[in-house]
Amino acid sequence: MNKPAQADDHRVDPENASKYLTFTLGSEHYGVEILRIREIIGLLDITPMPNTPDYIKGVINLRGKIIPVIDLRMKFALHCTEFTEETCVIVVEVTNNEAEERSLMGVIVDSVSEVVSIAETSIEPTPRFGAAVSADFIRGLGKTEISGQDRVLILLDIDRAVSDRSEDVQNDTGPASLSVDGLASKAA
Amino acid sequence: MDLENLIDEAARAVIGVAPNDRESLARVRAAFMELERAGPLQDAPVPQSLLTSVRARLDEAAASEVDEDLCTTLRDAIEEIQGWVDEAGTAPPTSREESAHPPSPNDDSLIQAWIASALDTAGDIEAILLLEGEMEASSIAELRRLLHNLKGECGVVGISGAQSLFHEAESTIDRVTDAGETLVRDWLFELVDWTRDFAAGLQQGARGVSDTDDRLLSSMRSMPSCGDRPTDSERSSDGDSGSELVVTALAETDETVTEFLSEAREHLSESEGALLELDRTPDDLELVNTVFRAFHTIKGVAGFLDLEAIVRLSHTTEFALDQVRNGERSVDAPLLGAVLQSSDLLGRMFDALEGGTPVARDELDSVIRGLGLDATGDADAPPPAPDTAARGAIEAPLEPAPDESKPAPTPAPSVNTKKGPSTDHGIKVSTGRLDSIVDLVGELVIAQQMVVQDPSVVRLNDQRSQRNLAQVGKIIRDLQEVAMSLRMVTMRATFQKMNRLVRDLSSKSGKRIRLEIEGEDTELDRTVVDEIRDPLVHMIRNACDHGLESPEERLAAGKAEEGTLKLRAFHKGGSIVVAIEDDGRGLPREKILRKAIERGVIARDRDPNELSDDEVYALIFAPGFSTADQVSDVSGRGVGMDVVRRNVEALRGKVEISSVEGHGTTFHLSLPLTMAIIDGMVVRVGDQRYVIPTLAIEQSLRPAPNQLETVMNRGEAILLHGELLPVYRLSHLFRIDGANDSLSETLLVVLESNSTRCCLQVDELLGQQQVVIKSLGDALGQVRGVSGGAILGDGRVAPILDVAALLAQAEEPTGALR
């Protein structure tokens, strides 16, 4: 925090500032690059999917297209709460690691707040929290003003945040996918 | 003598002419006739009508006397001609030679069409070549016809190099058969390969592809070995004017021309239909009239548009047909062939007008000669001049004609009794459009379900509305069926390619291999067919390289010297199975295990003997796995089987291997019939709905309490028709809350997959409906036990069960009894 935050820091110099959509999970504020957001929808009927990790709540019908929906609270192992009126689904574009193609995914969050600009310079690297917090899917911490208060915004690397490759979910993935694969991976 | 000299001479003669001077008049007449003969004043669009009218005046004068009036007319005429020539002198002269190469991609869609049909034709040719034994006359005729078509199509798109190549092939076949020799297939195979490569090159947009193959060309020319006759092309190149163009692209096509072309093409196809009818019923004069009318109309409009070559050709054809109408000539094969050729050439001329390959003079001449075969000389002559002159100025960009009085540069072509274009009235549609139809129909099905299941509609107690809704539903189902069938293609083409592959592999490896093909008419979704081509190639390569032994080995093992490879396609349950069966040495279990341990594909601490045969065979699908001691150019790198598995799994299919060491290996590829829509049974478990593919369902039943047995109070089974079937609960397998636990109150669905049967317990059957299979989204990837999602009538998603994977999961120790 070597550069003290100015009141209007978050809307200066559009050249090296990116826009972030902010949302909350419990008392924490998160941000996702606005360019990755496709739309924000209310909570639809979610069809659960068997044999998937718990944090995958299921799939929804987004105008004829089926997209998976993940519960970010579960993904981040936060305390689970009931869905409220404010709960909504942010539809984001994610890049699958294997294929370069982008696909859509719904992310359930407690509430969506606002869009803020954060200059690259006011993004701090994630401090090391030791094993307590996996910093894998955090791009950095941004300082900004939300609803008139100075807040720390947790900027997510959305590709990593929604992928199932982080270690905290490995044991939830259920039975191995296919027998041949299973054999190979067991052997390896 | 070139055009300018001719005109100068005419001008001098005209100046010298004086009233009542018969000698000078004769000179003028000679000069004008020379000019007129040079008819197609290509470099200068001199109106033919001018020449014709001058000539008419001269003829008139020859009969009466020369007066001052005539002299003025002549002077005016020559001045006008000079004016035309001067004007044209500034314009760049039109190229006289057909553009050799590179292929001028004048129209991408034309080229694409050419590529598609060239590949088809290449496949057909290959199929003929692969027929056993000596080639029969009918096959050779078919070969010639195919090559001829190919050649013609090359002409249409302007690939002249390939055109001459196919032409040469055609003449080579003629020469070889004329010489009474057997047709050697190898060069034809080479030609097929070259065609494929060339087409592939074109498709990839490679510009530098040579459109001909000199080596192939010269090897063809050297056939038959004893043959020292000049080839057709050499002969035609002897003719000095044969390649001059009579029809070239119009500088600009206005609406009239476009309209004419599209109408004329319609007339042509109409007349072609009639001609083919005539082949069967040669006495039907009404058909002759139809053809006659078509050519007559074309002639009329072409005359109006000053398209002289077209007028000439259609006139001659009309003339020949008129002879038939007058009973002077009978409808026989040569005539029909000639008329068909004429209509082909007309078609090409139309293309040429739109920028296709120009049509050369000798082609026109030879077709016209073909028509005049048994006719009086009249048919050979150009149409009477006044006929066209009356229609206005003629300014078709035509070149000087060869002297008609000279002997023809090429001998009359043997009249080809070809059947004309194929009678299949198919059109070529891009797969993109087909796919969007299938998609749209899929959406329509979903939308219809939503309407039908809407509570307010369900409540409608109006018989008429219900009937109408039912009708809509029926039409949509029919539409869906048609849409799906649009994408279905047979396995024939793919299997034929394998035929070729086996032949090549067999000659390369020195093994004798016989390929038996069965069920090539089985239809499959196009995507599926496309996707399994690579796997098939890999598996056949493997079978030929690893599976089948060398003749010596086979004899030593007490087998027939010739190895047999069977390629079969058949329906089984809800899928199509493609089986590749060889009677070779079988999969070497020990060797696979050894290699697998060496390569660390299986852990060292695992007892290899514990692995079942299936597990061992599954190892060969591992990437990079190969038992080959040496990497040959056929196989051995261990890529093939990995590709097989990936492609087949991507299609939601599976590969099964059965093998007996020493007796052979069989691969079964089970593939879904279609990729997009399935018939499904919607079932409810708890508050969740699932779709079970109807094809996997044998029956459903509400069990009587005494039918059910429990094993150690945990495993459940039911005695059904004397067979004990395990009972799995979907609610347990998928960990669904709120399901009915009492077996006797719920329903059992008997499922069959991979010849395993079992019962699946569900709470309720909600009904059968067609569902569109949707991917669950790339972000989720494959979910075990679920093959996709379906959007049901209420807009919610229901998972579609993958019965095979579900049963596999249920059989695992941890699966069913959680």
Image: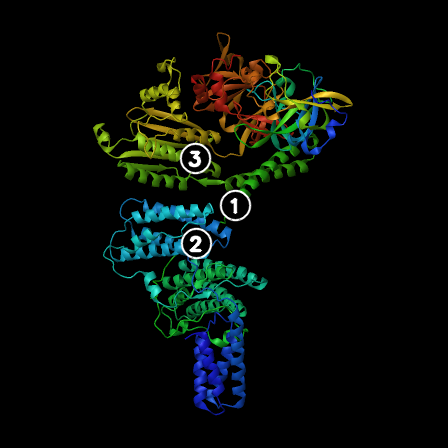
Q: Chain of mark 3?
A: B
User: x, y percentage for residue B244?
Assistant: 42, 66
User: x, y percentage for residue B779?
Assistant: 57, 27
| The furthest residue to the front | A2
Give the number of marks. Answer: 3
Badge 1 is on which residue? B430
| The furthest residue to the bottom | B20
- Determine whether label 2 and label 3 are within 8 Å by CB: no
Inspect the image, locate mark 2, and give the three-letter code of the amino acid beneath it. Answer: Pro
User: x, y percentage for residue B241?
Assistant: 39, 68
Quadrant of res B500: top left
Badge 3 is on which residue? B532
Residue B480, compared with residue B624, is above or below; it is below
Crowd rating for badge 3 (residues with CA inside 10 Å; few <14, some 14–19, many 20+): many
Inspect the image, locate mark 3, and give the three-letter code of the amino acid beneath it. Answer: Ile
- Determine whether label 1 and label 3 are within 8 Å by CB: no
The residue lying toward the viewer, choosing from A77 and B93, is B93
Badge 2 is on which residue? B102
Quadrant of res B131: top left
> Can see residue A177?
yes
Q: Secondary structure at mark 1?
A: loop
Tell me the distance, in whole angstroms, between the alpha carbons under discs 2 and 3: 34 Å
Q: Secondary structure at mark 2?
A: loop
